[in-house]
Image (cartoon, rainbow, N blue to C red):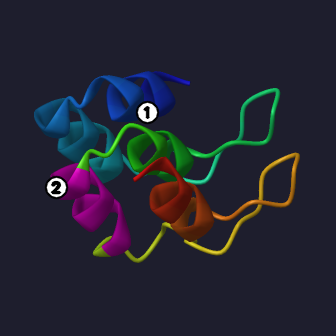
Amino acid sequence: TPLSYAAEGGHEAIIKLLLALSKVDANERDNSSQTPLSYAAKNKHNIIIMTFLLNDSVNPDLKDYYSLTPLFIATWSH
C-alpha cells in the first residue's frame, strides 16, 4: 500500500498526509500480513513509529504471517 511504501522508505510527511485521510486503512496488510507499522519498525524509523503509535487508528498488536508483532520486529531488528 502507499502507506507501507512510505513507512518502509521513512517518508514522514507522506505518512502524516495519508493518515489524515479518512479513507486510508492504517492497518492494511500486505501479502505477508505486515502492516505499515511493521515496515517502520523493521527499518528502524523511530519518528515514524511514534507517528503511528500516536494515531488512534493504528493497532500496534497486529501480527504478521509469522505471528510477529511490530514490537518484536523492532527489538529483533536492533
**Left or right of residue 35, residue 42 in this image:** left
> What secondary structure predominates along the stretch shown in magenta?
helix
Q: Find out whether residue 57 is within the magenta segment.
A: no
Please tell me which residue is depicted at 49% across the width and 66% down the height of the picture: 58
Secondary element type, mark 1 = helix
Residue 25 visible in rendering: no
N-term mark: 1 or 2:
1
- Amino acid residing under circle 1: Leu
Asked which quadrant contains residue 72, the reply is bottom right
Q: Looking at the image, is 45 positioned above or below residue 14?
A: below
Q: Residues within 10 Å of mark 2 (few under 14, many from 20)?
A: few
**Residue numbers of the magenta segment:** 46-53
Question: Quarter of the image containing the N terminus?
Answer: top right
Q: Which residue is mark 2?
A: 47
Question: Would residue 11 appear left or right of 78 to someone viewing this image?
Answer: left
Give the secondary structure at mark 2: helix
Check disc 1 and report the residue beneath it.
Answer: 3
Query: Would residue 52 be counted in the magenta stretch?
Result: yes
Taking the spot 38% from the left edge, 37% from the top edge, the residue there is 43
Decide: is 66 above or below 60.
above
Distance from disc 1 to disc 2, alpha carbons, whole Å, reads 15 Å
- Residue 50, located in which quarter of the rendered image? bottom left
Type of the residue with mark 2: Ile
In percent of the image, x 54 and y 49: which residue is there? 38
Horizontal relation, residue 59 to residue 67: left or right: left
Report the residue at 68% width, 42% height from top.
34
Q: Residues within 10 Å of mark 1 (few under 14, many from 20)?
A: many
Q: How many marks?
A: 2
Q: Nearer the viewer, residue 23 or 47?
A: 47
Compared with 58, 7 (above or below) is above
The numbered disc on residue 22 is none
Residue 56 lies in what quarter of the image? bottom left
